[in-house]
Image: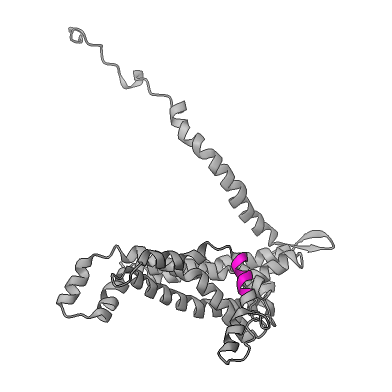
Amino acid sequence: MTALTSPAGTKPRTGPAERTRPPRFTARRLAPYAFVLPALLLFAAFKIYPIVQSFVLSLYKTVGGADTFVGADNYARLLDDPLFWTALRNTAVILAVQVPVMLALATGLAVAFDSALLRGRSVFRLGFFLPMITGLVAYGLIFSVLLNEKYGLVNWLLGLAGIGEVPWLVDPLWAKISLGLALTWHYTGYNAVILLARLQSIPTELYDAASVDGAGAWKSFLHVTLPGLRPAILLTTVLSTIGTLQIFDEPYILTRGGPDNATLTIGVYLYQNAFVYFDFGYASAIAYALAVLIGILGVIQFRVLGDRK
């Protein structure tokens, strides 16, 4: 038998065992991980560790200056805590009343901002968005001055119109209304801009087809605009729900949760337990209960408003 030889000028083929594989770890392959590593370390230090430590803390209670393991007692305590249920009810009222009103106003503003009949649309868009960039503490203080019962500008204007003083921040009902007004002023323009961005992506051919079919402005809004806005409505609803359930700055600055706990929210109650009563274990349990509630409501909203396909 004659041995197989390779053609002239070519190297003989080597078997699979003789092939050289590139090294698994090289500087080029490790470079992306090196760039990502600082961000991962910061995320682990300032996000993951506090979340885990907060859960561990919720299993303890400070007794006599020492942390004592109590298991799920802090979570069981939530069920029998009337102030927690009061805070949850107040938050639910804001969520059920203020958020729909705000999103309805934002939808109307988005349609107006997109209308060719409106002159100076850019000025109006900027004007309604500006409240969003105002600091929470700053605008809370502004509203506390404007709505002051004795010296506030709002009651002064009402007096000029022949209307008596309104106890904006000292009456339980009016305090809730004041909080809703402040939230609506601050966040409506922000949501309107989100809805406007989605509105401008709806093809004009759909409106032309609706017009050919005899649909007026109202039917076009119901059957073209609203279905087209569904992704943006879902986004703004979820963001508004999360923000409302975590609301703290506005009720704390305006009323400190009063009067008579009328504006006590979960965020304010959590703060009181952590930094007034120094019951960090119970405050951590409240935080985790709030996180679970946000997750449940988020899933429900995605089921109801999300793409049904």
Which residues make up the magenta segment?
Answer: 138-144
When asked about the image quadrant of residue 303, the answer is bottom left
Q: Is residue 80 left or right of residue 309?
A: right
x, y percent for residue 5: 20, 9
Q: Is residue 70 left or right of residue 90?
A: right
Q: Quadrant of the N terminus?
A: top left
Q: Quadrant of the C terminus?
A: bottom left
Colour logic: one colour
Q: Is residue 304 left or right of residue 47?
A: left
Q: Is residue 272 left or right of residue 25?
A: right
Residue 17 vertical placement versus 258 (above, below): above
Out of 57 and 264, give the one closest to the viewer.
264
Residue 22 vertical placement versus 176 (above, below): above
x, y percent for residue 283: 69, 66
Residue 89 seen in the current view: no
Out of 235 and 49, give the one closest to the viewer.
235
From this viewpoint, which residue is outermost toward the right? Answer: 64
**Residue at the (37%, 20%) spot, across then down:** 20
**Residue at the (54%, 77%) spot, across then down:** 181
Residue 121 vertical placement versus 218 (above, below): above
x, y percent for residue 110: 37, 70
Out of 96 and 9, give the one closest to the viewer.
96
**Residue at the (29%, 62%) spot, across then down:** 201
Residue 292 seen in the current view: yes
Out of 12 and 237, give the one closest to the viewer.
237
When asked about the image quadrant of residue 106, the answer is bottom left
